[in-house]
Amino acid sequence: MTARSAACFVVLGLLLGACSSIHGERAFAAYMQTSTSGDVSLGPTGGGVALDTRQNDFERSLGLDETKPALNFGGDMATDIGRFGASVLWFDSSGSGTLTRDFGDIPSGTLVNSKFRFFDAKTWWVYDVVERPGFRLAPGVAVDFFNMSVNAITAASPQVFEEVHVFAPVPMLFLDAEASVDKFTFVGQAGGMRIDLKDGIGNYWDLEGRVNYAVSDDIAVFAGYRFMSMASHGDADSRDAFVHVQTTGWFLGGELSF
């Protein structure tokens, strides 16, 4: 099964879940402070250069070292055939730095203005294999739609730039768990996969943990932490490219149950 086929399968499952008997629905929205680290490599137009000699660090070389705000929202629903959910996260970041290695056709030592754009849409299906008062454990599958781009624009000549863009619909093995104590609920989600996609071979991880506090039967507030990691080796405009990005951050939000 290809990555696109798996993505379509999970999305179709969400639609089928919506048509089955729904036992409960939840929606959430959160404010997240994100930090990005890692490195990116891009081969020259002519090719033939090892990428491990062209790594530019996000923070030191590209100047993408600031914490940026992000919006994260989504929801889930419990049905007769399992739990279905989805979430969306996006943010932009910019900075200035001096390349420590060649980046595409831009030589080392060039002052660049950098832009980083990140968008993630996640869908999942899980089934409660353990469901007891105060505890739930549910394995399943998910698809993370990663859409990310890194731009390096020369400060002296803005018309000269290089870009690495990665769009990866990544099917993952997924685990969802909850444990409740009085008004507190501890929630954990974990997904990961090594997969050969059309755009490249990659390792992908998406981990999240949070603590909910029930204000009432229908309203809760929460705080948590999310870790996403993507290491992808593929093509960028027919040139070799490698991206290793870790996006992490604390978040605060609220949840409404129906």
Image: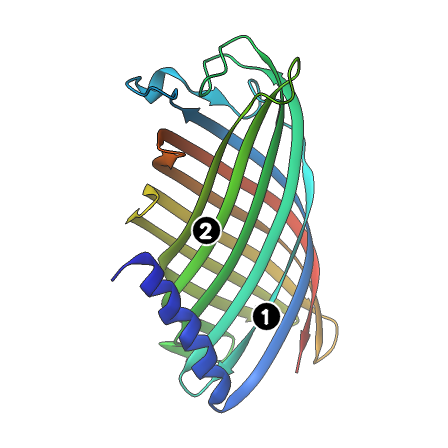
User: Which residue appears at 44% of the width and 65% of the height?
Assistant: 176
Q: Distance between the residues labelled 1 and 2?
A: 17 Å
Task: Classify mark 1: residues with Cα within 10 Å, few (<14), some (14-19) or many (20+).
Answer: some
Locate the C terminus and report the quarter of the image it occupies.
bottom right
User: Outermost residue toward the front?
Assistant: 159
The answer to whether marks 1 and 2 mark residues whose Cβ atoms lie closer than 8 Å is no
User: SS at mark 2?
Assistant: strand
Q: In which quadrant of the rendered view does residue 63 lie?
A: top right
Say if 106 sits above or below 64 in the image.
above
Give the label on residue 147, or none: none
Say if 63 sits above or below 30 in the image.
above
- Does residue 84 appear to the left or right of 157 in the view shown? left
**Which residue is denoted by mark 1 in the rendering?**
75
Report the front residue among 208 and 136.
208
Task: Classify mark 2: residues with Cα within 10 Å, few (<14), some (14-19) or many (20+).
Answer: many
User: Which residue appears at 65% of the width and 40% of the height?
Assistant: 92
**Which residue is denoted by mark 2 in the rendering?**
206
Picture colour scheme? rainbow
Q: What residue type is labelled 1?
A: Gly
Q: Give coordinates of residue 107: x percent, y percent.
A: 49, 11
User: Outermost residue toward the left?
Assistant: 1
Instruction: Name which of mark 1 and mark 2 comes first in the sequence.
Output: 1
Report the front residue among 20 and 45.
45
User: Outermost residue toward the top?
Assistant: 109
User: SS at mark 1?
Assistant: strand
User: Which residue appears at 35% of the width and 44% of the height?
Assistant: 199
Residue 132 seen by the camera: no
Q: Give coordinates of residue 181: x percent, y percent.
A: 58, 70
Q: Give coordinates of residue 84: x percent, y percent.
A: 48, 74
